[in-house]
Each structure stands twice: as C-alpha cells, then as structure tokens.
Image (cartoon, rainbow, N blue to C red):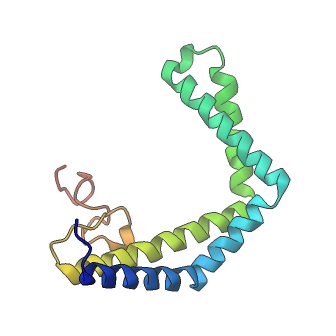
Amino acid sequence: MLMTDEWVTILEHAEELTEILLSSDVVISYRNAHTNVYSDSKLAKSIQEFTEMKERYEEVQRFGRYHPDYNIVMKSIRVQKRELDMNEHVAALRIAENDVQHLFDEVGSIVARSVSESVKVPAGSAFFSDSSCGTGCGTGGGCSCSA
C-alpha cells in the first residue's frame, strides 16, 4: 500500500477524532469508574477470583452434571456474580462501559453512513438498529426475518 497525501490526511483526522473521544465526558467517566473498581484491592481480588471461577465454570460446562464439581461451581459462580453485580462501583463501571460503547457505535455509524447508506454497520446495539425488532436482521427474531 502506497502512502499518499490523502492517507496522511485521513490518519491525521483519525488522530484528531481519537483525541476528541479521549477527552469526552463519557470516556473520562469511564476511566474514573475503571479506576474506582481496580484501585480497590479487595474488589480487584474479587474480580480476579470470579474470573478464575468462570474458567472452572467453562470446564464444568463441557461435562455438565456429570462433572464432580458441578454443583459447587454452579453455586459459587452465581454467588460471586451476584456479589459483583451488587457492588456500586462495578455497576457504575458497567454503565460507563455501555455509555462508551454507545458513543463508539454512534461515531462508527456516522462514519459508515457518510460513506454510503449501504455500508454495513454492526447491529449489536438496539440503539442504532434500523430493524423493527431492534435486534438486527441476522437474528431471525421478533421481526420475523430469517437468519
């Protein structure tokens, strides 16, 4: 690929957009929420333990009820997840993550649509879906579309 003046200009604009996004209130809120979660050593340890339990859960899922630790792992993962879900810092981080994702979805959609209406944009966000069911047309879902 040959680097042209046009490419350089596009890359410069992309860097400008990156700086704008990084200095936005949404991203700053996300960074603050992330810091609040991971600066709390007890909470960070709980998250690490949950991550390890998820790995055990995936192992147990391969064998199902026949795995000797099935009941222990299933109960433990639900208890740990509930504890994390109830933590106010974790909840704030999840909200901030969703806000950042919505911002990126919107920016991606604007860029794609500026090129052409036929440019495909991931339909993972119901917020930007053009489908009547709100889930995109790859799901075969409520809008009766076929996958």
Residue 109 in percent (x, y) is at 31, 76
Rendered image quadrant of residue 106: bottom left
40 in relation to 54, above or below: below
Q: Is residue 63 above or below residue 75?
A: above
Left of 137 or right of it: where is 12?
A: right
Provide residue 68's location: percent of width, then percent of height.
64, 14
Determine the residue positioned at 62% across, 28% down: 56
> Could one spot residue 94 in this view of the protein?
yes
Q: Quadrant of the N terminus?
A: bottom left
The mark tally for this picture is: 0
- The residue at the point 17 percent across, 77 percent down is 117
Q: Does 134 sit above or below residue 64?
A: below
Residue in the foreground of this view, choosing between 119 and 99 = 119
Snapshot quadrant of residue 26: bottom right
Q: Residue at x 36, y 61 (%)?
A: 124
**Residue 88 shows in the view:** no
Tell me if 146 is positioned left or right of 67 in this view.
left
Would you identify the image quadrant in which residue 25 lies?
bottom right
Query: Which residue occupies 35% across, 74% down?
Result: 108
The image shows residue 98 at horizontal and vertical percentages of: 53, 68
- Viewer-side residue, 75 vs 58: 58
41 above or below 72? below
Place of residue 42 in the rendered image (x, y in percent of width and height, measured from the top left): 84, 51
Judge by depth and name the residue closer to the eye, 61 or 134: 61
